[in-house]
Amino acid sequence: MTERTTPDMSSDGPPTAPLSPRLARARMAVSRHAAALFWERGVAATSGDDIAEAAGVSPRSVWRYFRSKESCVEPLLAASVYRFMAALDRWPLGSSLEEFLLAELSDDPSSPEQIEDDLSALRMIALAATEPAIRSAWLMVCDEAERQLVTVVARRLDLTTTNPQVRVCAAAATAAVRVVNEDISIAALRDHQQFTAAEVIHRLADAVRASTAETGFAGPARS
Amino acid sequence: MTERTTPDMSSDGPPTAPLSPRLARARMAVSRHAAALFWERGVAATSGDDIAEAAGVSPRSVWRYFRSKESCVEPLLAASVYRFMAALDRWPLGSSLEEFLLAELSDDPSSPEQIEDDLSALRMIALAATEPAIRSAWLMVCDEAERQLVTVVARRLDLTTTNPQVRVCAAAATAAVRVVNEDISIAALRDHQQFTAAEVIHRLADAVRASTAETGFAGPARS
DNA sequence: CAGTAGGGTGGCACTAACTGCCAGTTATCG
DNA sequence: CGATAACTGGCAGTTAGTGCCACCCTACTG
């Protein structure tokens, strides 16, 4: 019998392993079903077993994938936020953030399931306003996103990832996009406001600029 | 038998009731014992019953006070952060943040148990780096602190609490002081670095200034 | 001062969340 | 194909967390 070190990432410490694509897909599938159940019947009313059954996996696997039933929604939330962080990473120096993001958007129009996932994520962000456990999951996702943004900021400002200025800048920017996401989620889902992509991008860009003005991460404001 | 609506704030939704001072003290007592146990023997190795026993209350009461054993540390963390937010609230317009904070500090020197609590909080923040559940509690506390700061920023900038600029500013500032707290906790407890109060204040003020430069919340940098 | 209403506690039974273990299955790769 | 590692399901067990009710205080009120 060889060393059986089944990871059980439920207790995921900081040495965040890259995670096999296979596993990532399985987690994402569970995440979608969990979000749907949470949305349509509430968090308290859906059990881990319910999620497992809906996703077509064993309850044991759900607990292997996630450390709590609420954290099941993390992959869905993460996908949405990480895409934005990745876009910031690709953003060329010296160009306008708005224009870059708008160009990105028209370059690769989202697939239907992408849109469906984004909507689910939006729902979970709105749900986070009333469900502490979901809010906790959302904050953990933003926290991870912040860590990703640290490397982006460091490269952009040509500083190290341990530099306090870099870390503060990444944290401020992440917090800013979190708030915009929350505002928009609630306005859209609770107050039924409509937003164009351009409006959303404008608010995101403005928030990033305002929160990183001193470091010059986002450059000067647009006219 | 009259309507018995025992609240059980374990499921604390957004309508955050002000919480009776009696209850707040009891929660704080449990919080101190929980933090001590988590620190000396680890989170996984301390059960809710352990915490209850150490604090001299019934396990039932622990679950009445808190929605999870990890969130037991929230009052301790909150006390430390809220004091900083309250200081920002008292900060007069047009004066230097550093000088104001230093003056505050020498005005009311902390009591011994205050210092003990601050140390415990520092430990929990450091522990949050390796314990996801504690990190989650820490992020929830910062989230609540952010909500408090929104009202402070709104008054200072003479805008409403729903203004996007205000919310972004509060979020960025809160995230900045969170990062400084984390950096200092880890440097002090893991790397055994020493900090003077002036150094800590300087880093906090710098972070607040950098993250709120565009709104002018914190005024211009010191020479 | 007795009665009583309301906030708060403890105890107990119970459910749901979560873990350890192992045997079985499926992907991966030489 | 064979071997090895990654992954899954099932089941027994533990711990976390809830609902319910009797009880205890404190404070108010007639």
Image (cartoon, coloured by chain):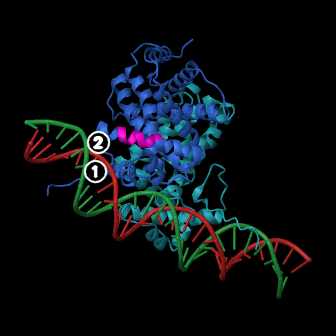
Chain colours: A blue, B cyan, C green, D red
Using the image as rendered, state which of residue A136 and residue A165 is in the foreground.
A136
Give how far across and how far down residue B104 sits, in percent. Answer: 57, 47
Q: Quadrant of the N terminus of chain A?
A: bottom left
Above or below for B95 versus B138: above
Residue A17's label in the rendered image is 2
Q: Quick check: B79 left or right of B179?
A: right
Q: Are marks 1 and 2 in contact (CB under 8 Å)?
A: yes
Give how far across and how far down residue A100 sits, in percent. Answer: 46, 15
Residue B6 showing in the rendered view: yes
Above or below for A101 versus A178: above
Using the image as rendered, state which of residue B178 and residue B223 is in the foreground.
B178
Q: Amino acid at mark 1?
A: Pro
Residue where numbered disc 1 is placed: A7
Magenta residues?
A: A25-32
Using the image as rendered, state which of residue A171 and residue B108 is in the foreground.
A171
Q: Is residue A30 magenta?
A: yes
Q: Is residue B59 magenta?
A: no
Q: Quick check: B89 left or right of A122?
A: right
Residue B57 showing in the rendered view: no
